[in-house]
Image (cartoon, rainbow, N blue to C red):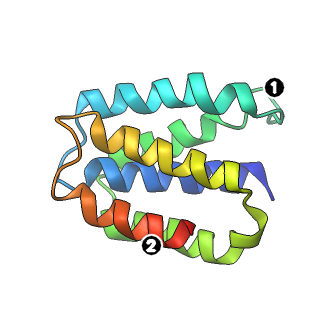
Amino acid sequence: MEAQLFYKELGRLLYAISAVDGKVADKEVRELKRIVSEQLVPQEVSTDHFGTDQAYITEFEFDVLADRGADVQGAFDSFIAYMSNHHSDLSAERKELIYRCADAVASAFHGVGKAELPLLIELHKHLH
């Protein structure tokens, strides 16, 4: 599985989770950056042609979508389509990582709210 595409789609998922309630809170952005630096970067071995860890693509994609005020459903649907096309390529550990990241971002600002919950439920269904 191509790391660049995985991290781009993960950024889309985390953006959708963060922005589903109509705004991206600073706490959610901080949590995303923590996830990337503490969970994604340490486990990724590939780098781009500048030597930057591929996991940072998650943060970059999130930031681009947030700056553009991108469509939340479109971002979420993009990740779900990625999942259905690559489901057999994802290990159980990778699926668990995806859900942990999504849950952490959803919980970052006053816990998981009624806007985030349906996305987490749908994500869980697609992961299993």
Residue 76, image quadrant: bottom left
Residue 59 x, y percent position in the rendering: 51, 36
To which residue does mark 2 refer?
77
Q: Residue at x 67, y 50 (%)?
A: 94
How far apart are the two marked residues, 1 and 2, measured between alpha carbons?
30 Å
| Residue 60 relative to residue 63: left or right | right
Amino acid type, label 1: Gly
Residue 50, by quadrant, is: top right
Residue type (three-letter) at the residue carrying disc 2: Asp
* In the image: residue 37, left or right of residue 106: right
Identify which residue, 14 or 114, lies in the foreground.
114
Asked if residue 26 lies left or right of residue 44, the reply is left
**Residue at 43 percent of width and 48 percent of height:** 102
Residue 8, how many percent across, how many down?
60, 52
Residue under the point 49% across and 51% down: 99
* Above or below: residue 80 compared with residue 24: below
Q: Nearer the viewer, residue 95 or 3?
A: 95
**In-front residue for pair 99/11:** 99
Q: Report which quarter residue 106 is drawn in.
A: top left
The mark nearer the N terminus, 1 or 2, is 1
Residue at left offset 47%, top offset 55%: 12
Query: Mark 2: few, some, or many residues within 10 Å (few <14, many ≥20)?
Result: some
Residue 71 seen in the figure:
no
- Provide residue 10's location: percent of width, then percent of height: 55, 51
Question: Mark 1 or mark 2, which is nearer to you?
Answer: 2
> Mark 1 = which residue?
51
